[in-house]
Image: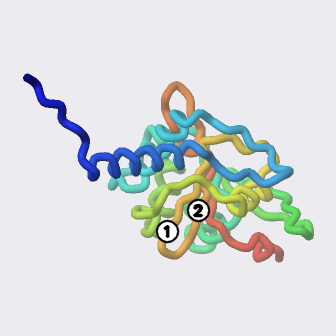
């Protein structure tokens, strides 16, 4: 006669914990009122999150992840532009008009060639090594509002916050043909600091 084996308490706890973790990942962001925000499927967000985590932890420039035009938001560009003229001479200036709450004209940057994107990625990871061990998670309401204040278009997932020991970054990705690519990267800070 075959005896039935019942799950142990430890097995039940592990299954419950995994279920809770999966449910938490699927809940999505808490979107503030007034923000135009388009959600993606849980599967798309999971694949994009994995791609972002791999890109951050890799030792080489993740060419396929950096294969489309990348925009550098105004705070991050303000961090990078002073020390690295090699980035700015080949890249495309992006003028941003922010209301925080007073009008502020700020500058971001667009990187169109693979060489520009690879240089940008290396520079960001060199300047902020904490990104390599950062926690990629759904963005919170204040992080969504920060990004919303810097863009003239709707937010479309995949959209994440990257929490490092010292900073929080926001990353917007594109997901096409089962592949995630970086679209926008910025560091969270007070946008009023950009006012000249």
Circle 2: element type? strand
Identify the image quadrant of the N terminus: top left
Identify the image quadrant of the C terminus: bottom right
- Location of residue 92 with respect to 130 vertically, above or below: above
Residue at the far left in the pictured view: 1
Circle 1: element type? loop
Marks 2 and 1, how far apart in space?
8 Å
Q: Given contact means CB atoms under 8 Å apart, are the residues at marks 2 and 1 in contact? A: yes
Point 23% across, 38% down: residue: 6
Of residue 134 and residue 62, the one placed in the foreground of this image is 134
Is 117 placed left or right of 183 in the picture? left
Please give the residue where the numbered disc 2 appears in the rendered image: 169
Of residue 83 and residue 33, the one placed in the foreground of this image is 33
Point 84% across, 64% down: residue: 105
Q: Position of residue 188 (x, y in %)?
A: 65, 67
Write down the quadrant of residue 42 in the picture. Answer: top right
Residue at the far top in the pictured view: 1
Of residue 155 and residue 120, the one placed in the foreground of this image is 155
- Location of residue 174 with respect to 54 vertically, above or below: above
Q: Is residue 112 visible from the viewing direction of this image?
A: no
Label 1: how many Cα within 10 Å (few below 14, some 14–19, many 20+) = some
Please give the residue where the numbered disc 1 appears in the rendered image: 164
Q: Position of residue 38 (x, y in %)?
A: 72, 38
Write down the quadrant of residue 95 in the picture. Answer: bottom right
Label 2: how many Cα within 10 Å (few below 14, some 14–19, many 20+) = many
The coloring applied to the image is rainbow
């Amino acid at each position: 006669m075959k005896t039935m084996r019942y799950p142990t308490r430890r097995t039940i706890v592990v299954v419950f914990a995994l279920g809770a973790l999966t449910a938490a990942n699927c809940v999505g962001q808490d979107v503030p009122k007034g923000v135009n925000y388009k959600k993606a499927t849980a599967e798309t967000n999971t694949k994009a999150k994995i791609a972002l985590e791999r890109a951050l932890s890799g030792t080489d420039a993740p060419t396929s992840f950096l294969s489309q035009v990348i925009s550098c938001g105004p705070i991050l560009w303000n961090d990078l532009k002073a020390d690295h003229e090699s980035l700015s001479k080949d890249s495309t200036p992006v003028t941003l008009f922010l209301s925080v709450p007073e009008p502020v004209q700020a500058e971001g940057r667009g990187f169109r060639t693979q060489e520009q994107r690879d240089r940008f990625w290396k520079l960001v990871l060199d300047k902020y090594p904490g990104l390599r061990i950062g926690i990629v998670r759904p963005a919170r309401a204040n992080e969504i509002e920060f990004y919303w204040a810097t863009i003239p278009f709707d937010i479309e997932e995949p959209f994440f916050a990257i929490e490092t020991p010292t900073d929080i970054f926001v990353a917007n990705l594109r997901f096409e043909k089962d592949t995630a690519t970086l679209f926008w990267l910025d560091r969270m800070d007070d946008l009023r600091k950009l006012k000249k």
